[in-house]
């Protein structure tokens, strides 16, 4: 196992752990205001300090991790659930009108800057976590469709697929039984990368006020709230900023490490 | 040394002296930042405060005008006489006043302006100011007789509003983009989305102002506001949007901070016709669930004065009723139980963009949660707020600052967005409007304040502070805001 895989796994599970623990325990109630105790720098009582309402930043970061992970996870889930079947279908019907429709549709979605359209969607349908999930999810569909189709196309040329066809299996069954397991590695790696991009997108949407609404804590909104106070309470911006960096870095390292680890060609070369 | 050389030397000396002299002269231009850009420049056809901030007393003048301390002094009317029964006002206009296009300002213009404002199809945002006017007669070019249907102790005050300025019939068609008034400054240029420039009017009837040009710059983002001020890109920020940054300006010798009061009663507006807020017990519970000091400290970083009714604390007739709705969550819970809502209820809390609303709303939502009320926060832009809350009345709660001076009269309008309907209050307002005796007026205003406070019409939070930031050398800025205005005629640079 590579170093980046281990480091990535450690960082990612740190964030995941924080999110999971926050369901049962946080040092303080993340929504409890304590205005006289506002803007404290990190100290023994409040490990990450307090925000402009005197809320405990550590608790907010923990619950915020939950928001980020939930939004990104469901968004990537939507992308996979719709994108992978589309990609498999396009590959199975290579060159047909169906393939054309699916892939040109992908190009259409790809042609728009994703965050701008996500802002448009949430601005039209209202701000909130659900709409943020949908907006981010839509842009994950073509990513998965394209990567699945690309990998599946080369598989369709292989002898074992030919054998399956000779034995009378239909295209749908071959896609599910033979193609999908063989592209799963790729999908896991891409899923990890998309997951980190989803976290960034959620933070971006929350930053402009279109993500999860208060009082649900969200890292992006914590950053936005901190803007005018950076000069005298830098921890307000540094801590959610670091949380985003750690998560995204962790997931990217994990994705890279997984790719190296799961790719048989690289494994052979290493051995 | 020859004579020639002496002469050359002398002229060099004279030249350098004149260069020094120009340098010693005070600056005569200023850049003033405001948060909102005016939608257009006609103060007589819109409620937008930003219009008045730019044009009031600078471009347009009324018969009377507000001073920075809130007093009302003669404007275009030099003097006036009031008939014994208080219904006929005879204004003597200043002689030799011209509009910026060169035409003379006379009694016909006053008649035109007032008739236009009170006309059936008038777009004036404050038609109530003119409601009592029966007729306006131009007696001679410098005399105007205004007859009221009944005495109105507020009439001279009403005529000082930006909505009552004198406009000319010749230039009325383009007033929104090219305002032509009588003021000490003429309209220069409007770069949409960026700035408006005003220039000194050399033909002004009064004293020439110290400033030659003034530029109003529009900076809506609080972070950008802080950066622009710190970089000295602007000389003055009329009302600084981020109270949390004020200590930094105070500590910096380059700047001065002017903390004053505005006419802005910041309230938790409650939809009095929507269940469960149609029950006075619920509204009372709401009032006791709110900790005003926490909101002032948390949202405004300590700037603001708690209020217990819809009235400005600096007004002599103000009654402190904060005790009537003191923070008492236990009492709020028992009131809710009494109203049959022991398990609380759900409502919406619409928040417009200013930080008093967005931050105040988060604090209020948390305080309401303590007594079992779930308020779903809905952040809206101003356009949305006007559409769905103010016009559509589709809201449970909202936070907004009512910045018009002496606006307790809005509670007499049952179709106003918070929909308070009380015949007692309406009768009280009618009585107040026809009363001229100052002591009696004070008593009636006190009664009106008590009535809305004990009816718990809205949650009364705090009086909005005016947080002016300016470079150290700027003089003559208004500390308080008796009306939305940036009076350029008083502003100058220290030598």
Image: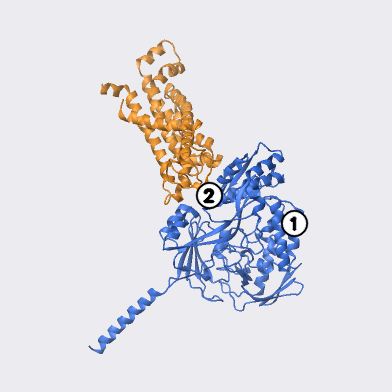
Left or right of B352 in this view: B249: left
Quarter of the image for residue A90 reads top left
**Which residue in the structure is indicated by mark 1?**
B426
User: Which of B362 and A270 lies nearest the eye of the viewer?
Assistant: B362
Looking at the image, is mark 2 or mark 1 nearer the viewer?
2
Disc 2, SS: helix
What is the crowding at mark 1: few (fewer than 14 residues within 10 Å), some, or many (at least 20)?
some
Q: Which chain carries label 1?
A: B
Quadrant occupied by the N terminus of chain B: bottom left
Name the colour assigned to chain A in the rendering.
orange
Q: Residue at x 42, y 20 (%)?
A: A180
Quarter of the image for residue B70 reads bottom right
Q: Where is residue B235 in the image (x, y as percent from the top left)?
A: 45, 63
Q: Residue A252 carries which label?
A: none
Left or right of A19 in this view: A254: left
Q: In the rendered image of this protein, does residue B393 appear above or below residue A128?
A: below
**Which residue in the structure is indicated by mark 2?**
B298
């Amino acid at each position: 196992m590579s170093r980046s895989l281990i480091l990535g796994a450690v960082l990612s599970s740190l964030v995941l752990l924080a999110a999971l623990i926050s369901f049962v325990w946080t040092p303080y109630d993340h929504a409890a205001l304590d205005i006289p105790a506002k803007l404290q720098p990190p100290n023994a009582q409040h490990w990450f300090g307090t925000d402009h309402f005197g809320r405990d930043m550590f608790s907010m970061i923990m619950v915020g991790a939950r928001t980020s992970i939930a939004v990104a996870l469901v968004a990537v889930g939507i992308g996979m659930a719709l994108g992978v079947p589309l990609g498999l279908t396009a590959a199975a019907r290579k060159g047909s009108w169906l393939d054309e429709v699916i892939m040109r549709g992908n190009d259409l979605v790809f042609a728009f800057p994703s965050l701008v359209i996500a802002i448009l969607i949430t601005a039209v349908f209202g701000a909130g976590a659900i709409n943020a999930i949908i907006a981010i999810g839509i842009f994950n569909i073509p990513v998965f469709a394209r990567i699945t189709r690309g990998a599946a196309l080369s598989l369709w040329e292989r002898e074992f697929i030919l054998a399956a066809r000779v034995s009378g299996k239909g295209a749908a069954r071959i896609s599910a039984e033979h193609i999908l397991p063989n592209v799963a590695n790729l999908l896991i790696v891409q899923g990890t990368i998309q997951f980190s991009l989803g976290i960034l997108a959620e933070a971006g949407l929350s930053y402009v006020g279109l993500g999860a609404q208060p009082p649900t804590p969200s890292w992006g909104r914590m950053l936005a709230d901190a803007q005018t106070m950076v000069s005298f309470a830098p921890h307000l911006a540094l801590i959610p900023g670091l949380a985003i960096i750690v998560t995204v870095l962790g997931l990217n390292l994990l994705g890279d490490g997984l790719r190296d680890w799961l790719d048989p060609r690289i494994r052979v070369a290493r051995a | 040394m020859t004579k020639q050389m002496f002469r050359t030397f002398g002229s060099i000396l004279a030249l350098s002296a004149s260069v020094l002299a120009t340098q010693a002269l005070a600056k005569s231009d200023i850049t003033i930042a405001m948060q909102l850009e005016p939608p257009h420049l006609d103060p007589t056809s819109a409620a937008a405060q930003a219009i008045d901030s730019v044009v009031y007393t600078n471009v347009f003048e009324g018969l009377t005008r507000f001073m920075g301390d809130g007093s009302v002094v003669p404007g275009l009317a030099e003097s006036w006489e009031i008939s014994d029964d208080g219904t006929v006002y005879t204004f003597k206009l200043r002689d030799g006043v011209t509009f910026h296009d060169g035409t003379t300002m006379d009694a016909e213009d006053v008649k035109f302006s007032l008739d236009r404002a009170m006309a059936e199809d008038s777009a004036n945002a404050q038609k109530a100011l003119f409601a009592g006017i029966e007729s306006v007669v131009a007696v001679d070019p410098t005399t105007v007789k205004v007859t009221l249907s009944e005495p109105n102790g507020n009439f001279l005050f009403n005529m000082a509003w930006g909505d009552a300025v004198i406009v000319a019939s010749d230039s009325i068609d383009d007033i929104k983009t090219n305002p032509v008034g009588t003021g000490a400054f003429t309209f220069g240029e409007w770069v949409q989305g960026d700035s408006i420039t005003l220039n000194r009017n050399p033909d002004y009837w009064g004293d020439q102002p110290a400033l030659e040009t003034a530029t109003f710059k529009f900076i809506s983002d609080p972070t950008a506001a802080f950066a622009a001020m710190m970089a000295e890109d602007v000389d003055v920020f009329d009302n600084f949007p981020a109270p949390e940054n004020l200590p930094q300006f105070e500590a910096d010798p380059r700047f001065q901070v002017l903390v004053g009061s505005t006419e802005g009663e910041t309230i938790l507006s409650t939809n009095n016709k929507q269940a469960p807020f149609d029950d006075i017990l619920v509204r009372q519970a709401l009032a006791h669930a709110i900790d005003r000091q926490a909101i002032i400290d948390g949202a405004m970083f300590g700037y603001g004065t708690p209020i217990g009714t819809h009235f400005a604390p600096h007004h002599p007739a103000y009654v402190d009723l904060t005790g009537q709705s003191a923070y008492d969550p236990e009492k709020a819970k028992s009131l809710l139980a009494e109203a049959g809502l022991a398990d609380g209820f759900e409502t919406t809390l619409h928040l417009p963009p200013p930080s008093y609303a967005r931050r105040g709303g988060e604090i209020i939502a948390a305080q309401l949660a303590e007594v079992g009320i779930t308020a779903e926060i809905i952040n809206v832009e101003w356009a949305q707020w006007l559409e769905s809350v103010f016009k559509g009345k589709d809201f449970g709660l909202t936070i907004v600052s009512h910045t018009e001076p002496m606006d307790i009269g809005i509670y007499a309008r049952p179709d106003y967005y918070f929909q308070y309907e009380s015949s007692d209050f309406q009768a009280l307002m009618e009585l107040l409007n026809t009363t001229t005796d100052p002591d009696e007026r004070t008593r009636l205003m006190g009664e009106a304040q008590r009535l809305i406070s004990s009816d718990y019409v809205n949650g009364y939070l705090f009086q909005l502070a005016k947080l002016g930031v300016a470079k150290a050398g700027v003089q003559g800025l208004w500390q308080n805001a008796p009306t939305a205005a940036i009076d350029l005629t008083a502003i100058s640079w220290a030598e």
